[in-house]
Amino acid sequence: MRAAMLTEAGVKIQSTPEPAPKTNEVKVRVRACGLNRADLLVASGHAHGRIGGAGTIIGLEFAGDVVEVGADAKGVAVGDRVMCSGGSGWAEYAVADWGRVTRIPDANVSYEQAATLPVALQTMHDAIVTNGQLQAGQAVLIQGASSGVGLMAMKIAKVLGAGLVIGTSTDAGRRAKLTDFGADLAVDSRDAGWVDQVLQATDGAGVDLIVDQLSGYVANDNMRATRLMGRIVNVGRLGGFKGEFDFDLHALRRIQYIGVTFRTRTVEQVREIVRKTYADLGAHVASGALALPIDSVFELNRAADALAHMKANVHFGKIVLRVD
């Protein structure tokens, strides 16, 4: 089969044997794949959990048709149209643990659309609902809201009844689009006055929850923008892996600062995340309320071009690979 593989010369399309599913796995004929920042990290030679290094097939999410089901796998059958999270997805065939495989909810949802959903839905349900404990009527701020995962975060907050949704983007053009995806207010996290805008919008109190995909340069301002006893969930580090942290401010505001990742979770824990995600949000996915815009579609043999497009950071929404 063909696969987008990391080599000493970068990401190349290579011929490699089809994967054989373990008893807990499902084998899928892949039709489309979504791109994520973690894929860019792996493609640049860094490890992402246990994934990385020469010989790695890139790709954390994909959609397609089930062609084989392991003896212990549950909930899916050969022929099902599915969307999956896992590893080694940018290939003609891929496998995933059965707990990370979900039927595409509607025949009208294309493989390309389905491939944009697993990582965004699972990441942001875990951040907003499980760890962020968002309640109806509360205010939430999404740092890095113009990414695919960020857009999904705003949409999830809206369908769950958030009273105020604020999104950030450093690009004026993308910032102007955030209101189309659930933002009541859009601010620039590089603007020295963004915290004042948030405080003004919340009558001086600050937001109940920040979902932070930036960290780095926004860490202290995040705490200024969070209400007393509010919550900050750290999902990403697009603004830097390190930065200043005002421990006194953290203590004064009695903020719960929570870090999340899938990399240190057990198989059982990830299965439960996926189960909760679709139990809470499945109807909204099926209705189309939780859908993401597709910025561009590249053929599998142009995987390197798709990665370059993501690295340029000029896209809005998801970048997708089509696998014929």
Image: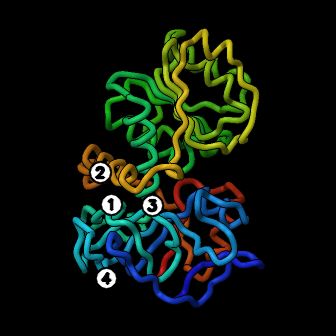
Give the camera-side residue of 269 and 317.
269
Residue 165 in the image, given as x and y percentages of width and height = 45, 30
Q: Give me the disc on residue 275.
A: 2
Residue lying at 61% horizontally and 56% vertically, measured from the top left: 37
Mark 1 or 4, which is nearer the eye? 1
- Is the residue marked by circle 2 packed among few (<14), some (14-19), or many (20+) residues within 10 Å? some
Query: Residue 143 location, x and y as percent?
Result: 58, 36
Q: Residues within 10 Å of mark 3 (few under 14, many from 20)?
A: many
**Residue type marked 4:** Val
Give the alpha-carbon distance from disc 2 to disc 3, as whole Å.
18 Å
Which of labels 2 and 3 is toward the front? 2
Identity, as a three-letter code, of the amino acid under mark 2: Arg
Name the foreground residue: 65 vs 95: 95
Name the residue beneath numbered marker 4.
67
Q: Is residue 259 above or below residue 4?
A: above
- Vertical position of residue 92 compared to residue 191: above or below: below
At which x and y percent is residue 59? 54, 68
Element class at badge 3? loop
Q: Which residue is mark 3?
A: 116
* Secondary structure beneath label 4: strand
Secondary element at image label 2: helix
Q: Amino acid at mark 1?
A: Gly
- Res 99 label: 1
In primary-sequence order, the first of circles 3 and 4 is 4
* Badge 1 element: helix
Residue at 25% in and 61% down: 105
**Circle 3: residue type:** Thr
- For marks 1 and 3, the one nearer the N-term is 1
Give the side of residue 154 with respect to residue 241, left or right. left
